[in-house]
Image: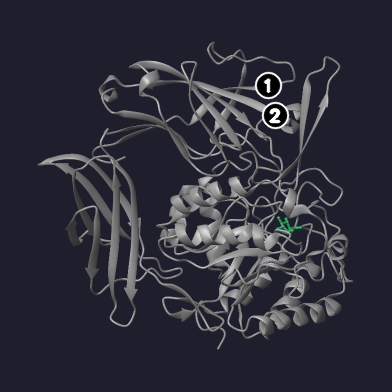
Amino acid sequence: MTATRSVLSLNGIWSFKMQAAGDVIDPVAPLKTTEVMAVPASFSDQTANPEIRQHSGYFWYERDFTVPAALMDQRLSLRFGSATHEAWVFVNGTEVGHHKGGFTPFELPINDTVHAGTNRVTVKISNLLDHSTLPVGNYTETKDAAGNVIPHVDENFDFFNYAGLHRNVNLMATPWNRVEDVVITPKIDLATNSADVAVTVKSTAAATVKVTLLDENEAIVATAEGAENTIHLDHIHLWQPLNAYLYQARVELFDGDTLIDSYTEPFGMRTVAIDSGKFLINGKPFYFKGFGKHEDSYVNGRGLNEAVNVLDLNLLKKMGANSFRTSHYPYSEEMMRLCDREGIVVIDEVPAVGLMPDFNFDVSSAFKNNDNPFWSTVQTQAAHKQALEEMIGRDKNHASVVIWSIANEPATFLPGAHDYFEPLFKLARQLDPQDRPCTYINIMMSTPDRDNCSDLADLLTLNRYYGWYIQTGDLKAAAAAEEAELRAWQEKWPDKPIMFTEFGADTVAGVHSAYNEPFSEEYQVNYYDMNAKIFDKIDNFVGEQLWNFADFQTKFGINRVQGNKKGIFTRSREPKAAAIWLSRRWNGIPNFNYKK
Ligand code: BDP
């Protein structure tokens, strides 16, 4: 909302219908249903009907909304924070647009289909995934007795396939001639404590562009005119981990003296660089302490839950942590803004998860299989490019984002992986105006001798489960194997920083063992203790992000008891013993200069 723009929330209770086999639904007529769903949220855990929760296919949402007559002269659009995974949007029965990809926003103009007063919006949602989508799902079809196709998706990944209108839905009214994008790229000189801030404004009209930079007290620190500016600032305040400082760029379009549009974008000033095996933020070696997370909470499922976001960051800070990864998809815009404000360091990840032949928990099979033709059959390249464009397009200005993660645990030990990833790394580097480091999250079968892609990444971000999926329960053997692998990586790439982006052990809160038994709280503590001792021995080891912040929901399976239990908090955010142990460790580790 600005002086020239209105935003009206369409969150709330919507009508809802699962499209069962054989159902024909025509959006020209109002949806025939008595079911309702709250938005934003997954529908999955709001229903009491297991058939809806487990259904693969199509779902319909609908509600009325009012367009005030006073807004009818403006450009009207519907904006969805995300619709998971694919959506077709109809206004008063007419299709106004479509979007595929469940974790990034989209906006659809609706002037031609609305009138002042009451209107109807209908959204058809698909939760289907296959070998061309991100995330990757295993798609199969059967037929019922009447010959109707029954689709089925088996997640090729370890989290529940939550779906629905997951984030805010808004009616927006903007001027016809408007600001379309703002790109803010601060080039900082740490030695002189000054910056040249490049501000590029993309607008729909040839208008006079005015840019005003404001400090945290809303005092004006600089002004400039034109669509492309480089503004010099002295005596800058740096955005620091856990000590954020946010400036604002106010962008205004003028026609003569008349204000046509205005938009304000917050931004922070910090540098990110990699040098001699260190990860530098503002020129100093940073040590990542934190988590792989999920957008996952009771009832809301994967839906935006701002209270949980605030609690999670409060718990994170209390533990002495400083960072997390948006495993395994871009998180809400609200969470990204919160991280900017709270000084949380973020690894931002596209939904490229499941890029491996058959997701299962038998790690040994993949160690043997080195000739699977996976990369010549998978068809995700187009979706992957789109996901990178949309994530970097959305998140480019966030100070909190310091690394782009281009995939989680792709099968980089198989031939063809390098050809698949090379163009994606190139694209990410072209798209990012701030030249942040790029990486992929390396799976444990991709050891230094087997991995095909580590030359592409700026740093080594490893997921390792020594003592869990291998050497289960034997922390001594696990420690030896883990240390040997880390030393091999360091030798192979002496200038690349190494960090763990996952390591963890399933732990059922309340289970105890005098014998250090896996699944007990004691084992989880000892597992982290073992890992910490290794990390502290490796010079280029720059961070530990464990798996996972909290227990989270997964598909049904014999390896999961109501979900993945590797949280150091339960799903309701109660600490397990490991959370207390890790708080002590992390509160004793400074954010900077931990490794000499
Ligand atoms: C890794 C995945 C993550 C899983 C985790 C686990 O990146 O999504 O949840 O392991 O098995 O394979 O707990």
Query: Is any atom of residue 215 visible in this view?
Result: yes
Give the x, y percent position of residue 583: 62, 71
335 or 204: nearer the viewer: 204
Residue 511 in the figure: left or right of residue 98: right
Q: Which quadrant: the N terminus?
A: top left
| Disc 1 and disc 2 in contact, CB within 8 angstroms | yes
Give the x, y percent position of residue 557: 84, 46
Query: What is the spatial separation of the Cα atoms under label 1 and label 2, in whole angstroms?
Result: 7 Å
| Residue 57 tag number | 2
| Residue 19 tag number | 1
Disc 1 is placed on an element classified as strand
Displayed quadrant of residue 53:
top right
- Amino acid carrying label 2: it is Gly
Of mark 1 and mark 2, the one earlier in the sequence is 1
Q: Quadrant of ligand 1?
A: bottom right
Residue 11 in the figure: left or right of residue 410: left
Q: Which quadrant: the C terminus?
A: bottom right
